[in-house]
């Protein structure tokens, strides 16, 4: 069954210039110097639509680096001021949404460990009501198309018009060359079910190693 969402096409989005919509930047913002230097190098290519950097990192296990937190928002604001690039970061709860919006973040994405939880997605959707911001929803870690569609529906119901999906692959117990199995049939099914939704591919999370990226 085709799902109809009240959203706008990507051609109407800020940052779209008639070429591939490229989101680029470090997985984790580790220092202000790293963020600024990387953003300036990307800006001069003229190919990047949005500079991204994770500042709140929901890790699989504790005692791992979980991001620089709110300090990273100041760095992203500086990127925007000095390069003119749009900036984006991951939000995992409603507090993250409020903090990111205070600093003028242009794009928010909901990660794979968050999109798997309808309660959390709804809390984020509630925080987004009345806000005009780009939002992308990554596929859940497990290959469940209904969870993915449900998360998109919740965000669309909050009035978000610039809404897209990100295919970043799926967790599997089986060992493969990929960090996350692409399971291409799922993004293809998402396209069939929601024809108008923009779908970006996250090859870094799928591959897990730069040797597979070309």
Image (cartoon, grey):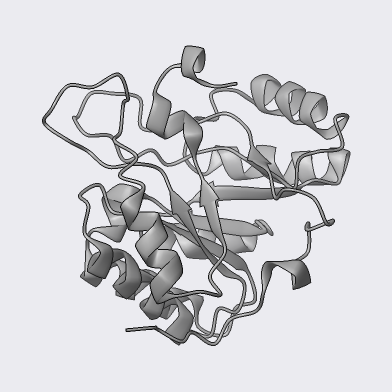
Q: Nearer the viewer, residue 201 or 46?
A: 201
- Residue 180 occupies quadrant: top left
Q: Compared to 25, does 212 lie above or below?
A: above
User: Residue at point 80% right, 45% down?
Assistant: 85
Q: Residue at x 56, y 38 (%)?
A: 71
Most distant residue in the top direction: 211
Q: Is residue 147 visible?
A: yes
Q: Residue at x 67, y 74 (%)?
A: 9
Foreground residue, 46 or 65?
Answer: 46
**Is 27 situated left or right of 175 in this image?**
right
Within the image, what quadrant is residue 6 found in?
bottom right
Q: Is residue 176 above or below residue 192?
A: above
Instruction: From the viewer's perspective, tell me whether residue 43 is left or right of residue 6.
Output: right
Foreground of the two, 209 or 114: 209
- Is 176 above or below relative to 195? above
Viewport quadrant of the C terminus: top right
- Quarter the N terminus occupies: bottom left
Identify which residue, 18 or 41, lies in the foreground: 18
Q: Looking at the picture, how far across and down is residue 174, in whole percent? A: 13, 27
The x, y position of residue 66, in whole percent, is 36, 32
* Total number of numbered discs in the rendering: 0
On screen, residue 26 versus residue 106, left or right, reads: left
Residue 67 visible from this viewpoint: no
* Residue in the picture at 35% in, 25% down: 65
Residue 63 x/y as whole percent: 23, 23
| Vertical arrangement, residue 168 with respect to residue 118, above or below | above
């Amino acid at each position: 069954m085709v799902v109809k969402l009240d959203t706008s096409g990507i051609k109407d989005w800020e940052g779209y210039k008639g070429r591939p919509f490229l989101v680029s930047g470090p997985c984790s913002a580790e220092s202000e110097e790293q963020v600024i230097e990387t953003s300036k190098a990307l800006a001069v290519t003229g190919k990047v639509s949005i500079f991204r950097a994770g500042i709140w990192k929901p890790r699989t296990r504790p005692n791992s680096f979980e991001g620089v937190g709110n300090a990273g928002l100041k760095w992203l604001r500086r990127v925007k001021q000095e390069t003119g690039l749009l900036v984006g970061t991951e939000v995992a709860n409603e507090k993250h949404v409020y903090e990111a919006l205070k600093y003028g973040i242009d794009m928010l994405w909901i990660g794979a460990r968050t999109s798997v939880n309808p309660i959390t997605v709804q809390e984020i959707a509630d925080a987004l009501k009345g806000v005009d911001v780009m939002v992308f929803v990554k596929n859940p870690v497990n290959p469940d198309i209904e969870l993915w569609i449900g998360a998109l529906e919740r965000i669309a119901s909050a009035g978000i018009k610039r809404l897209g999906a990100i295919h970043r692959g799926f967790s599997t117990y089986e060992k493969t060359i990929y960090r996350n199995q692409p399971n291409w049939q799922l993004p293809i099914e998402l396209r069939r079910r929601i024809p108008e939704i923009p779908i970006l591919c996250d090859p870094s999370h799928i591959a897990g190693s730069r040797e597979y990226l070309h």
